[in-house]
Image (cartoon, rainbow, N blue to C red):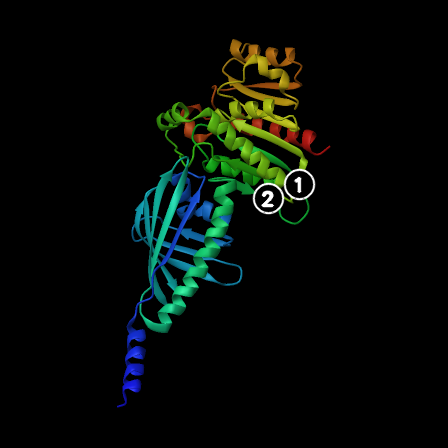
């Protein structure tokens, strides 16, 4: 055999056995490692940014993940390693071929550096083609993920069906974090004709345990929580389906105090609702509140509630704030089932009706 043919066949044989290089990506987000990890594993968060119409995610070793899209495309695989906020190993099935990706989450200042290494099985042209497909898949996926984590990390947004523009409500969670209760209220607001956005002020933490929730309140940076709320409000006003001139803020417990803090710092708001606020802005700041305020408290003695309630309402009135106040029968904190015996379904339902009536008056004029 002539030398040139021998060399040619040797090169062909070598190319057929060369493994494709792994797909590697490194990207930074302003979100925390927990928020970044949650966005990639928690079902409701995957729905927020992936564009999938169906999501299943069992984020345990051996658990299955599956995203189904309107064009009948299905992305799926299994979780291999699930170390929250630190490491995530998973498989991806593409064209009947299973590949493995390793994701590492590293705290980077106030954000996260996400490093991805996706191994490509096989060799030769088939492996190179698969590598190209997976490379494009990650680029598209990370672009959508970045839009979510750069704007509303860990947030939950709902919109009314159909086109057009709608008034919007920023929803601020209580000490339990952005839990199922808060997301349910957002769903109800969108059914009412509002765009609703609940922001994550606890950077990926949520619980149903009251002791843990109280610890969150002690550890959270109030400045960071307020900044997350302001950033969420700014994002709402940039959306094409939002009537930016008709926005309001509503919070419960911890979020009630933050809603009032947003209210005194944003003169464009049309309404501010606070259910049993954990605290309040300084009296010297109350005169900055331009929006009408709805305050809802619960007290065992409705006729003679705790002096702090009357004092706060009086401070608002003296500051020239248009304020509506309701005191309902019940304990001080009543709006989340995680409060246990303190939860009051009747007071919550009554507060919800009052809040909807208030929002309709302020945002639909």
Q: CA distance from mark 2 to mark 1?
A: 9 Å
Q: In the depicted view, which residue is nearer to us: 49 or 191?
A: 49
Q: In the depicted view, which residue is nearer to us: 245 or 175?
A: 245
The crowding category of the residue bearing disc 1, from other C-alpha atoms within 10 Å (few below 14, some 14 to 19, many at least 20), is many
- The residue pinned by badge 1 equals 166
Q: Is residue 44 above or below residue 77?
A: above
Q: Would residue 256 be found to the left or right of residue 221 on screen? A: right
Q: Is residue 67 above or below residue 351?
A: below
Residue situated furthest bottom in the rendering: 1
Q: Residue at x 36, y 52 (%)?
A: 116
Answer yes or no: is residue 189 visible.
Answer: no
- The residue pinned by badge 2 equals 159
Q: In the depicted view, which residue is nearer to us: 154 or 207?
A: 154
Mark 2 residue element: loop
Q: Residue at x 46, y 24 (%)?
A: 222
Q: Would residue 263 be found to the left or right of residue 24 on screen? A: right
Q: Which quarter of the figure is the N terminus placed in?
A: bottom left
The crowding category of the residue bearing disc 2, from other C-alpha atoms within 10 Å (few below 14, some 14 to 19, many at least 20), is many
Where residue 228 appears, as percent x and y from the top left, is 50, 32
Where residue 52 appears, as percent x and y from the top left, is 50, 54
Do the numbered discs 2 and 1 sit on residues whose CB atoms are within 8 Å? yes
Answer yes or no: is residue 101 visible.
Answer: yes
Q: Would residue 8 be found to the left or right of residue 133 on screen? A: left
Which corner quadrant of the image does residue 100 belong to?
A: bottom left
């Amino acid at each position: 055999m002539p030398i040139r043919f021998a060399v040619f066949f040797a090169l062909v044989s070598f190319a057929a056995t060369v493994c494709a290089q792994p797909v590697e990506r490194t990207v930074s987000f302003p979100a925390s490692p927990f928020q970044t990890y949650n966005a990639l594993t928690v079902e409701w968060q995957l729905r927020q940014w992936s564009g999938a119409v169906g999501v299943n995610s069992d984020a345990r070793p051996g658990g299955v993940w599956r995203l189904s899209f309107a064009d009948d495309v299905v992305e799926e695989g299994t979780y291999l390693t699930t170390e929250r906020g630190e490491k995530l190993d998973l498989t991806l099935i593409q064209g009947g071929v299973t590949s493995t990706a390793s994701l590492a989450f590293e705290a980077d200042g106030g954000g996260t550096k996400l490093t991805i290494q996706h191994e490509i099985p096989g060799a030769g042209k088939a492996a190179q083609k698969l590598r190209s497909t997976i490379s494009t898949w990650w680029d598209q996926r990370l672009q959508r993920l970045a839009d979510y984590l750069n704007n509303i990390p860990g947030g939950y947004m709902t919109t009314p069906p159909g086109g057009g523009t709608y008034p919007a409500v920023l929803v601020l969670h209580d000490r339990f974090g952005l839990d199922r209760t808060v997301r349910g209220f957002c769903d109800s607001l969108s059914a009412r004709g509002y765009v609703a956005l609940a922001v994550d002020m606890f950077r990926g933490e949520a619980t149903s345990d009251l002791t843990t929730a109280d610890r969150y309140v002690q550890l959270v940076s109030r400045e960071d929580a307020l900044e997350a709320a302001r950033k969420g409000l700014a994002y709402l006003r940039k959306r094409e389906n939002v009537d930016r001139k008709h926005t309001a803020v509503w919070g419960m417990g911890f979020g009630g105090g933050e809603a009032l803090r947003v209210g005194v710092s944003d003169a464009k708001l049309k309404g501010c609702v606070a259910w049993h606020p954990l605290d309040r802005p300084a009296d010297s700041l109350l005169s900055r509140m331009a929006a009408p305020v709805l305050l809802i408290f619960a007290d065992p003695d409705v006729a003679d509630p705790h002096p702090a309630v009357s004092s706060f309402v009086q401070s608002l009135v003296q500051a020239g704030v248009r304020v509506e106040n309701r005191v309902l029968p019940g304990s001080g904190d009543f709006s989340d089932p995680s409060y246990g015996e303190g939860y009051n379904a009747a007071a919550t339902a009554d507060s919800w009706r009052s809040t909807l009536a208030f929002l309709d008056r302020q945002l639909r004029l």
